[in-house]
């Protein structure tokens, strides 16, 4: 099985002006091809530094995919950098230039002279036509190794990866099998507690098991390598069953399911509606509930400031009467002595909760943590 590394190119990424989403897209799809991705890197728009990192990476991996630096300006150096890394010159390809001309004509424009830079590629490389942009991609091969350079514009990169690059990799490396992942979402149980319960599973070789903590939610990821999807599913299922036995009700969903999805679905089964009251949260809870289609969420009241003297339970009960909902959540964020805590009230026909919980994380994450904590408290009462 070949391994791959991804190199994103662009000073704007290093400066924090844009967020790299290309690496995540490529990593997910390479996983599905059964290609291991062991590292991703980012380098600025400097020819020598790009060439250096390519040479370093070639020493330890078979496949390098770069994104970015294929535009028409002087600070788009990827073509020259890849050529330098392999000790090659760049060469002008008239067919690529014609593609650029035709592409620009569709917009009723004539290409500028500096766009000819995009028709240059490392000598002997495999040119990859870009049918959705003006920057051709290219592939440089060296025996069983290759460097694939793609545009940095996400939609262009994704299109070329799916239509050209992934088929190329399947053929060149005779790829078979798959790497499949399943993520179980938990709440109400800390990462360290989960680790104590499943630590032995985290030492497995295939499938592998790993943890990722968020704000009031901990994900347990199961990743399996197999020759077919069905074999991977079987490997994952065995470990998942064990995880569910050990973690029990802490697991609320899997993969794309969210805490609000699961909670509202449970309410819908009972025929109950939910109303909320939030103070000093920026409406985090209401926003997440409102995005889910359906009539289960009856609306929320969002109050600014700390609402001194607020009687939270009474305010939630009043909101239930106004909205006609059967269940309610009240959530108040409060700074206490330089730290943070949240007041939570949950009201359901099955009983309720009224408590204050301390929070030790970054203040900017308090609203998300509080919303998850409150939703989990409601879930536990359904």
Image (cartoon, rainbow, N blue to C red):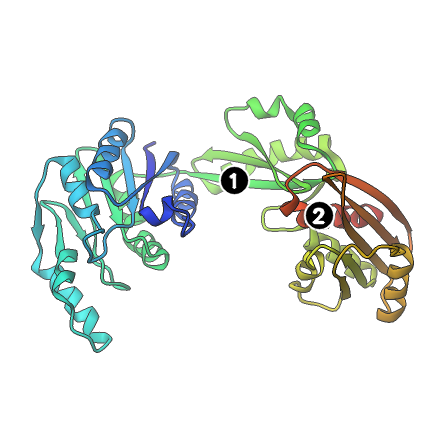
**Quick one: label 1 or label 2, which is nearer the N terminus?**
1
Residue neighbourhood size for the residue with mark 1, other residues' Cα within 10 Å, grouped as few (<14), some (14–19), many (≥20): many
Q: Are marks 1 and 2 in contact (CB under 8 Å)?
A: no
Horizontal and vertical percent position of residue 89: 8, 43
Residue at x 71%, y 56% (from the top left corner): 285
Q: Which mark is residue 253?
A: none
From this view, report whether residue 59 is shown above or below residue 212.
above
12 or 129, which lies in front?
12
Residue neighbourhood size for the residue with mark 2, other residues' Cα within 10 Å, grouped as few (<14), some (14–19), many (≥20): many
Residue 150 visible? The answer is yes
Total marks drawn?
Answer: 2
Residue at x 16%, y 62% (from the top left corner): 115
Residue 382 visible? The answer is no
Q: Quadrant of residue 163?
A: bottom left
Residue lying at the far bottom in this picture: please name it: 108
From this view, report whether residue 23 is shown above or below residue 55.
below
Q: Which mark is residue 372?
A: 2
Q: Is residue 268 left or right of residue 50?
A: right
* Viewport quadrant of the N terminus: top left
Q: Is residue 242 left or right of residue 331?
A: left
Q: Secondary structure at mark 2?
A: helix
Horizontal and vertical percent position of residue 281: 71, 55
Q: What residue did someone put label 1 on? A: 181
368 or 305, which lies in front?
305
Q: CA distance from mark 1 to mark 2?
A: 24 Å
Q: Is residue 265 left or right of residue 352?
A: left
Q: Is residue 79 left or right of residue 17?
A: left
Horizontal and vertical percent position of residue 48: 19, 37
Residue at x 83%, y 43% (from the top left corner): 356
């Amino acid at each position: 099985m070949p391994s791959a590394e991804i190199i994103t190119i662009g000073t704007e990424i290093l400066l924090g002006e844009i967020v790299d989403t290309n690496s995540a897209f490529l990593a997910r799809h390479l996983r599905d091809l059964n290609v291991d991705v062991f590292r991703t890197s980012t380098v600025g728009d400097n020819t020598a530094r790009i060439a250096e990192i390519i040479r370093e990476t070639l020493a330890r991996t078979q496949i390098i995919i770069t994104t970015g630096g294929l535009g028409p300006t002087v600070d788009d150096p990827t073509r020259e950098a890849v050529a330098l890394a392999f000790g090659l010159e760049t060469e002008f390809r008239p067919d690529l230039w014609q593609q650029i001309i035709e592409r620009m004509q569709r917009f009723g424009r004539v290409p500028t002279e500096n766009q000819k830079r995009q028709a240059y590629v490392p000598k002997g490389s495999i040119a990859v036509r870009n049918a959705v942009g003006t920057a051709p991609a290219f592939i440089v091969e060296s025996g069983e190794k290759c460097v694939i350079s793609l545009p940095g514009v996400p939609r262009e990169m994704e299109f070329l990866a799916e239509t050209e690059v992934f088929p190329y990799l399947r053929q060149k490396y005779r790829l078979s099998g798959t790497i499949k992942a399943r993520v179980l979402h938990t709440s109400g149980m800390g990462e360290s507690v989960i680790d104590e319960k499943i630590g032995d599973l985290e030492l497995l070789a295939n499938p592998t098991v790993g943890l990722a903590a968020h704000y009031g939610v901990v994900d347990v990821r199961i990743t399996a390598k197999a020759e077919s999807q069905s074999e991977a599913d079987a490997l994952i299922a065995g470990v998942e069953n064990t995880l569910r036995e050990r973690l029990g009700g802490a697991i609320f969903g899997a993969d794309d399911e969210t805490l609000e999805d699961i909670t509202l679905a449970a309410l819908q089964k009972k025929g109950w509606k939910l109303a909320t009251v939030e103070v000093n949260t920026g409406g985090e809870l209401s926003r997440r509930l409102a995005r889910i289609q359906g009539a289960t969420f009856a609306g929320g009241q969002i109050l600014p400031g700390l609402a001194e003297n607020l009687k939270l339970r009474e305010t939630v009960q009043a909101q239930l009467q106004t909205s006609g909902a059967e269940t309610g959540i009240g959530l108040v964020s409060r700074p206490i002595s330089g730290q943070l805590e949240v007041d939570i009230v949950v009201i359901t026909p099955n009983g309720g909760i009224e408590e204050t919980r301390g929070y030790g994380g970054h203040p900017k994450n308090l609203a998300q943590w509080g919303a998850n904590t409150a939703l989990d408290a409601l879930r536990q009462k359904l």
